[in-house]
Image (cartoon, rainbow, N blue to C red):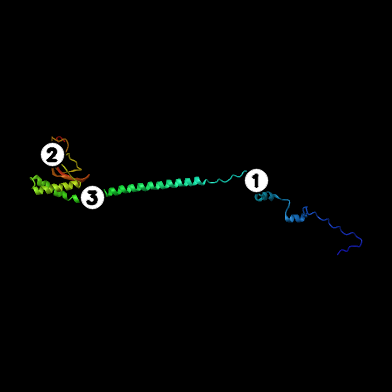
Amino acid sequence: MTTRRTGEPQDAAPPPQDPTEDPVVPPEQRAGVGDLTDISGVDNFIEEGAPLEPSDLDDVDAPAVPDDDGAILAASQQALAERTADLQRLQAEYLNYKRRVERDRELVRENATFAALAPIVDVLDTIDRAREHGELDAGFAAVAEQLERVVASAGLVKFGEPGDAFDPNLHEALSHMGEDPDVEVTTSKVIAKAGYRIGDRVVRAAQVVVVDPAGS
């Protein structure tokens, strides 16, 4: 312990520090806490956290405000176009379905008519052979004529006459009689059995005897 002698002047106390002045940090403490003179982060603080001045807003573009009426109108028009396309597609599908049903119905009707009239062809052949042998009795003739009218109204058409040009789609050649100078193409000379068709569908081909033109 150091003793102070009587009469020696005491160490002068350090003058009071002005509170407005920055505190003096010794170099050894300054090295421990970092260089307080580095204020590079102040600019970032000012740029990121400081309040904006009115002049800073001049360069900022205002967000576009959607036009509610225009957006609703565009959406409505798009929805209308989609619904119109759906209706047109449904109408086309319905028309195709309707045509298909009508075509199938017609085919079913033709098949049913064919199945019902095909066996009657043999009955009509019998009537034809009876006529070839002479006049029919009054009662039998009336029945035969009525039957022929009924099947004709149902769509059964009779075809095949002597002198018809031979058509392999309509005629069945039973035999060949040679040449005939009176014909220019192969011709049905004799009709053994008449042919019948319903529309374009042949129920039975006409059975014929044919002749060829001379020099063929």
Mark 1 or mark 2: which comes first in sequence? 1
Q: Which mark is residue 54?
A: 1
Identify residue type, mark 2.
Gly
**Any mark on residue 111, and which?**
3
Give the residue type that dot 1 points to. Pro
Say whether residue 66 is left or right of residue 106. right
28 lies above or below 155: below
Front-lying residue, 199 or 167: 199
Q: Are marks 1 and 2 in contact (CB under 8 Å)?
A: no
- Earlier residue among tags 3 and 2: 3
Q: Amino acid at mark 3?
A: Asn
Image quadrant where one finds the C terminus: top left
What is the crowding at mark 2: few (fewer than 14 residues within 10 Å), some, or many (at least 20)?
A: few
Where 9 sits versus 103, above or below?
below
Between tags 3 and 2, which lies in front?
Answer: 3
- Residue 178's disc number: 2
